[in-house]
Image (cartoon, rainbow, N blue to C red):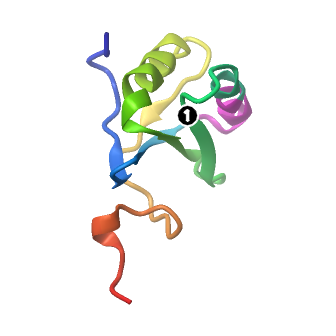
Amino acid sequence: MVSESAPTPVELDPGLLAFYLEVPRHQIVLLQAFFELYDGVGTVRTLEGDKSVVSLLTTPAQQADCINVLNAIREHVEWQACREIPEDRQLRPTSAQPPE
């Protein structure tokens, strides 16, 4: 079951979703450790360490599991969905890719 407090993912391409989260700087490594325990559910990537912004990459097939893990660890990791999607030149939705 997916919680109503779930963040909204951004589709980067048809097989890759990103959740953009704000996490207290001292808890980023803890967030990464939790997702390492749940192998294959998601990968945490720090985008803006000074602002404590991370992306959590997952697949559409793992989206519900990823949200469930986020909600299960909320008492240990004080994450919140980003109000604005950060500028991330390496991971942008395919519709936002500049023409070549």
* Picture quadrant where residue 4 is located: top left
Residue drawn at (66%, 52%), measured in percent from left and top?
49
| Image quadrant occupied by the C terminus | bottom left
Closer-to-camera residue (84/45): 45
- Residue 35's x, y, as percent? 63, 27
SS for dot 1: loop
- Residue 69's x, y, as percent? 51, 18
Please, is residue 98 above or below residue 41 in the view? below
- Residue 97's x, y, as percent? 36, 74
- Type of amino acid under label 1: Gly
* Picture quadrant where residue 12 is located: bottom left
Q: Main secondary structure of the magenta part?
A: helix
Asked if residue 84 can be seen in this view, the reply is: no
Residue drawn at (48%, 61%), measured in percent from left and top?
91
| Image quadrant occupied by the N terminus | top left
Please, is residue 50 above or below residue 21 in the view? below
Residue 66 in magenta?
A: no
- Residue 2's x, y, as percent? 31, 16
Asked if residue 92 can be seen in this view, the reply is: yes
Taking the image as shown, residue 49 lies to the left or right of residue 72, namely right
Please, is residue 5 above or below residue 55 in the view? above
Residue drawn at (34%, 48%), measured in percent from left and top?
10
Give, as a single range, the part of the protein colored magenta. Answer: 23-32
Residue drawn at (43%, 38%), measured in percent from left and top?
59
The residue carrying mark 1 is 42
